[in-house]
Amino acid sequence: MNVVNYEILKKYPLCNRCFGRLYAKLLHATNIERGEALKLFKLLELEAQIKKAKEENKSYDEELKFLKCIVKSGIEKTRLLNEIKEEDIKKEVCPWCRDIFNKEKMEKLLKKVENLLKNYEFETFLIGTHLPQEIKDLEKEIETEFMESIKQEFGREFGKMLALRLNKSPDKEYPDIVIHINPYSEDIYLQINPLFIKGRYRKLVRGIPQTRWLCRKCRGKGCEICNYTGKKYPTSVEEIIAKPFLEATGGIDEKFHGAGREDIDVRMLGDGRPFVLEIKEPKIRKIDLEKIAKEINKDGRVEVLNLEFGVRKDKVFFKNTPHRKTYWALVECSEKISDEELKLLEKELENRTIYQKTPKRVLHRRADLERIRKVYKVKTSKVDDTHFEMIIYCDGGLYIKELISGDDGRTNPSVSSILNKNCICKELDVLKIHDDNLLEKID
Ligand SMILES: [Zn+2]
Ligand SMILES: [Zn+2]
């Protein structure tokens, strides 16, 4: 079997490194070594053929032509140099690498990258190499099954030099910074990956939304209605938490990912709700989480706990896992309620499946669907003739205000339908998000 396709050298004067790269997955050698060795072997064969042809007085034009191609591609170790005119073997630039591995060129690129990086604190990086279309096309044409793309080799070599120079490590999975380079055009741009901080928050007051809420009229630009703030609510859990992080990191923006959300008028108590804060393009990454937690907690409206550094996939986890919850609710009834009725309510709602059409109050922004959720346990305690408190342990995603009111029959069964009275939720708190043990019970 013919493993090595020497014919390609007749068409393209591939340098030793590039010719060796065509077979990079064979032999434990550098691309340059492999390319040189393979070319030497072909030169040796051609020399022998030419020698024989001379002895037998035969023509050896073809062989000599081939030999010239190989010499031209960067290897001169032949005894037949005296038979070749100098202009026949004038070195051409290799069409694949176009000399991008040249020491001075690499050095120039390194300096450029170093200069761009000096504004950012980071520990890990990744080189993203980008090839011009014509190089990609050429690679496709000359490809062998043992080849390595020039992208890989450049990325690796440049990465090694940069790591040594800056004393940082390459990281394929979670690099702080990705350095995108086109070594042919010498275009560089930095992708500063976000810093992720995860933890839990408690919202101790009613009346603030979880995330930034833009003014519906101007969508953030500022208008008369929003008093030129661009916002419908002056602050949010997101803003209270993010502010000191943005200041400490010099990030340009942030995104807040909560494991679900509570309504504006609902408090989040107990051990809090998990969240991930994403700080975009941070300049500083080594921040003192404890110090920032203290600063946030001084606010009095929002508290953070269990802060730690996270990674990108944390936010996906949050989006996809609905957790069971325990709520506290204050219920107001249109008529007097008795202790017996409350006992009945507890019994009726235990392990009860609830059919819930999208609440009327959110219909303007959500599709009209029916969801099926379960209530596992309810505890009640009477406050006065028309008020009682309720502790509800249920599936995540159940709308509690509608579980109580019935939402004109759109939630079934409901506290209203079971008691056969109009009931409304006056106050609501989240007491616990059961994100570790789904079998936990309330007592
Ligand atoms: Zn080359
Ligand atoms: Zn506005």
Image (spheres, helix red, strand yellow):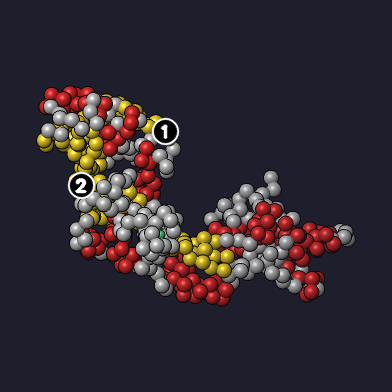
Residue 113 versus residue 424 in the image, above or below: below
Q: Quadrant of the C terminus?
A: top left
Residue 49, which numbered label?
none
Disc assigned to residue 269: 2
Q: Residue at x 26, y 26 (%)?
A: 417
Q: Quadrant of residue 361?
A: top left
Estimate the x, y position of residue 57 in percent, counting from the top left.
88, 61
Q: What is the number of callouts on the image? A: 2
Give the SS element for disc 1. Answer: loop
Residue most toward the front?
335
Q: Position of residue 61 (x, y in %)?
A: 85, 62
At x 75% / y 60%, what residue is drawn?
A: 11
Q: Is 252 situated above or below 421?
A: below
Residue 226 visible, this orientation: yes
Crowding at dot 1, Cα within 10 Å, few <14 / some 14-19 / many 20+, comes out as few
Which residue shows up at 21% across the image and 52% down it?
Answer: 205
Label at residue 369: 1
Up the image or down, 400 lies above or below 131; here it is above
Q: Where's the N terminus, which quadrant?
A: top right
| Amino acid type indicated by mark 2 | Leu
Frontmost residue, 385 versus 346: 385
Cβ of mark 1 under 8 Å from ligand 2: the answer is: no
